[in-house]
Image (cartoon, grey):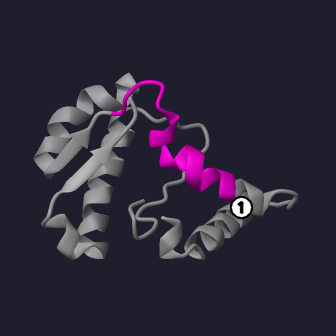
Amino acid sequence: MDQDGILLIDYLPKGQTINAEYYSFLRVQLEDILKEKRRGKVTKGVLFLYDNALDHRAPAQKELAYLGFQCLDHPPYSPDLAPSDYRLFPGLKKQLKGRHFSSDAEVIASSETSLDGQSSEFF
């Protein structure tokens, strides 16, 4: 996400874990989405904040530089810098609380409807 809204939502397939290869795939996907949705902003540069997980950080350095992203270090023990955990997900959980879903597809559809319904001021 950026200040204007959600850019990329990815649902990890059941049984799969996030590893360096999958994380790399997502970064390339994000570059394509940035070019499509935020044309004028990409030319100004991209600041990329990511966590300190070794699987994410180690292989990411060269690739992010290749993509033209400027990396911001995520200081350890700084929950205020994880907007998805402390801004995005609590509101989503509140909206989905108490609802029962019969399939993953229903959860995905409800989540995306909720996220798409947020105003730009939210972000």
Packing grade of label 1 (10 A; few <14, some 14-19, many >=20) is some
The residue at the point 46 percent across, 36 percent down is: 18
Q: Which residue is mark 1?
A: 107
The residue at the point 58 percent across, 73 percent down is: 118
Left or right for 104, reference 44: right
The residue at the point 36 percent across, 23 percent down is: 54
105 up-or-down from 80: above or below: below
Give the image location of residue 26, x and y in percent. 36, 50
Q: For residue 13, say whether it is visible.
A: no
Residue range highlighted in magenta: 74-91
Residue 79 included in the magenta stretch of the image: yes
Left or right for 101, reference 4: right
Give the image location of residue 117, x and y in percent. 60, 76
Left or right for 39, reference 86: left
Viewer-proximal residue, 1 or 99?
A: 1
88 up-or-down from 79: above or below: below
Q: Amino acid at mark 1?
A: Val
Residue 88 included in the magenta stretch of the image: yes
Left or right for 31, reference 74: left
Viewer-proximal residue, 93 or 83?
A: 83
